[in-house]
DNA sequence: AATGAATGAGGGTTCATTCAT
DNA sequence: GATGAATGAACCCTCATTCAT
């Protein structure tokens, strides 16, 4: 299996750095190859084409993203706690990998529609996770029984995304993780049933 | 003034269509010119370069966007009503111009970082409007006195954006405007003070 | 006659300045028109095309060049004196019109082969003048009876040209006219019969 | 080293032919590539851009030019003999490469001022060679002790250049090398001390 | 498996010239 | 005669991908 050979990850990590440093459109395959310490042609032994690098990049990174979050929220009792943990973990992981944050929030969005549809496929795993939390909260009575799961998911995801993007566009110069609790409060308010 | 001559708008409208149909990266200047019914060179009598078309496009469309919303919410009393009207108008305007929706939600985001920073400048007008509503609501007591205006604005904007993008990615096959009220309710919940 | 209307010369003088300031390839017709204070289209009422401006420019300037030199050498007795006067006048006229010097020595040579052939046609008047002096000197016994008129003309013209070009390439920062006498002495040596 | 790979010279030789045949401004990179039997993009593996081809062309050709002349005059005793050998070799080498003659005398002069300044840098090697001969001749007493080296160099260079250019403009239809001796006599006269 | 030299398609922009007013 | 808005042909260079070694 190609994915288990060391060069596979080398190339993906090189791609993250190359894109973060040069921008999506200036991250030529040659530059990625140089960063990875392999020849240009070697890239094509591991990936079908350039797009495939990006999709794989997203899959790998988002995969571990979701796994990590799932781990973290496992022990939590309430939906509210799970939501908080998700937001905190999400913010925290991107805070700790500046390059990845730039790539996911800014650069990868410059890809064309096709690629973005594929990226969305990958995102579905994350979205399901969010919807799972919402469903749990609804069932437990924490959230409003009339809560529209899809809309709420869009609110949660859209808010987190906008918050992270704003932070990246401001050159990551403030503490993103510190915002987690406030964002959580806002979103919780949105989902909670009124007395 | 160039902006008042008919070809200026012709070209911008042609750009919207060309980008929506072909995607940002395949909307060649030649295609835009053909759509506008002018020669390639004519484009450069009205715009400095291709990027300038896109920035102008965004300014023109977003400008009338904000104006329209301002008009609409003028008569409204409460912040909640203003918020609802804003969401409805936002959703409605994009519903009525399918091409523009594709361009703003998908294609224009493929532009490079520089262009996106310029687009963000234009967006600030809209963001101010949102913050104005939030401030009003806070002062009138409708919203929580501890509401973080910036975070709330990111929630509102992020949620609307995510909702519209999801709709566009689903080929605009359901009624976006119909979602306005539910989205409003969610966001209002998020902002409102608890008893 | 077009050549007698004021705009004809206006445009030619504008061309000299535009070319000297911007270089041959950046002296667009539009720039020449602006310098001349006329509309782009007006140029084409006086000249067939851009090349025609340049040929006419050369004809006008070189014409008065040759006339002036002819006047100056008329009173001179010996071929040597005529040669000196020619060199002095040549150097002096280009010293006094910095723009024209740049245009004739550097910029106009960037024209294509066709244009240069036409320019050469114009130059023939000057070359005849040189050959006339040489013939006179040969007949009077000042110059060697075996002197090859054509080669001697090429030496004289080539030397003057190289001297002026070197001066222009050095930003005209020394006194060109002061070199006339030394150049004259060199060339005279070349042409004079040995005892 | 790129300069030693065969395609480097292939491309330069192709450029000489393409420029001689089509003129400087119509010698598109595509045409040069076709002549060289390589793909357009290959050009850019060996040269930074089109201008770089031209500068390299001049350097290569002028370099071997100067080397050849240096070799040839090495054995010569007197400055007069060296001068003759230089003129003969200069005329002969351009006679034997019709394309190169067209390119150096006509086409390359159409380049812009920047390129011409770079070409002049390359020419300095040749000019030094001429000045060396002049200095030797002055010291040995062959040339006038009052000879202005720079002016004499301009005469020699200007005369040779004008002679070759006239020959090229006349479609190389007479024997250039046959003129060497007469030109030499003229120039020698110019430099020699009078009794 | 790995290399890296070679490929060649594709597009933004300039500017001489025209022509309706 | 004069205008100047409009035209559209022409070209350098980049970079993802291939394939002989």
Image (spheres, coloured by chain):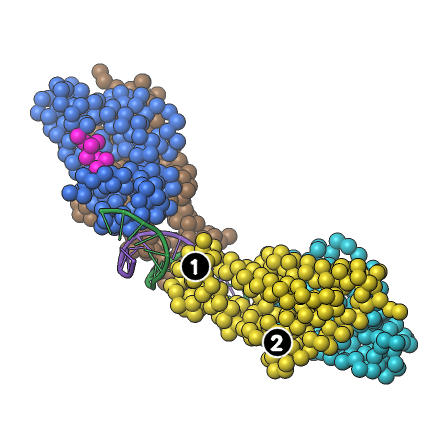
Chain colours: A blue, B brown, C cyan, D yellow, E green, F purple
Above-or-below relation of B38 to C47: above
Q: Residue at x 62, y 64 (%)?
A: D71
Quick check: is A65 in the magenta stretch?
yes
Chain letter of disc 1?
D
Asked if residue B178 can be seen in this view, the reply is no
Q: Using the image, name the chain to which the residue with label 2 belongs.
A: D
Give percent across and percent down for residue C155.
74, 72
Q: Going 42% across and 56% down the picture, which residue do you hit?
A: D45
Neighbor class of circle 2 (other Cα within 10 Å; few <14, some 14-19, many 20+) is many
Task: Tell me where the magenta segment starts and ends, as one range.
Answer: A60-67
SS for tag 2? helix
Percent across and percent down for residue B22 are: 29, 55
**Residue D79 in view here:** yes
Name the mark nearer the viewer: 2 or 1: 1
Which residue is rendered at x = 83% and y = 82% of the image? C145
Q: Position of residue B75 (x, y in %)?
A: 33, 34
- Residue under label 1: D5
Quadrant of res B85 = top left
Graded by Cα atoms within 10 Å as few (under 14), some (14 to 19) or many (20 or more), the crowding at tag 1 reads few
Say whether residue B87 is magenta. Answer: no
> Which residue is rendered at x = 51% and y = 58% of the image?
D52
Q: Quadrant of residue B83?
A: top left
Task: Please identify the residue farthest to the left as the structure is shown.
Answer: A139
Q: Which residue is mark 2?
A: D168
């Amino acid at each position: 299996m190609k994915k288990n050979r060391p060069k596979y990850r080398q190339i993906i990590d090189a791609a993250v750095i190359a894109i973060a440093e040069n921008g999506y459109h200036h991250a030529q395959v040659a530059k990625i190859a140089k960063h990875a310490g392999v020849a240009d042609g070697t890239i094509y032994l591991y990936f079908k084409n350039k797009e495939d690098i990006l999709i794989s990049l997203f899959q790998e990174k988002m995969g571990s993203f979701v796994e990590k979050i799932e781990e973290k929220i496992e022990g939590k009792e309430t939906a509210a706690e799970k939501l908080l943990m998700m937001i905190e973990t999400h913010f925290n992981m991107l805070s700790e990998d500046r390059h990845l944050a730039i790539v996911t929030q800014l650069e990868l969005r410059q890809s064309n529609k096709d690629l973005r549809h594929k990226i969305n496929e990958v995102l579905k795993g994350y979205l399901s996770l969010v919807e799972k939390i919402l469903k749990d909260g609804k069932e437990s009575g924490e959230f409003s029984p009339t809560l529209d799961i899809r809309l709420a998911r869009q609110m949660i995801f859209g808010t987190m995304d906008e918050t992270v993007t704003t932070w990246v566009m401001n050159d990551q110069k403030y503490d993103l993780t510190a915002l987690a609790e406030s964002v959580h409060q806002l979103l919780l308010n949105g989902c909670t049933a009124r007395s």
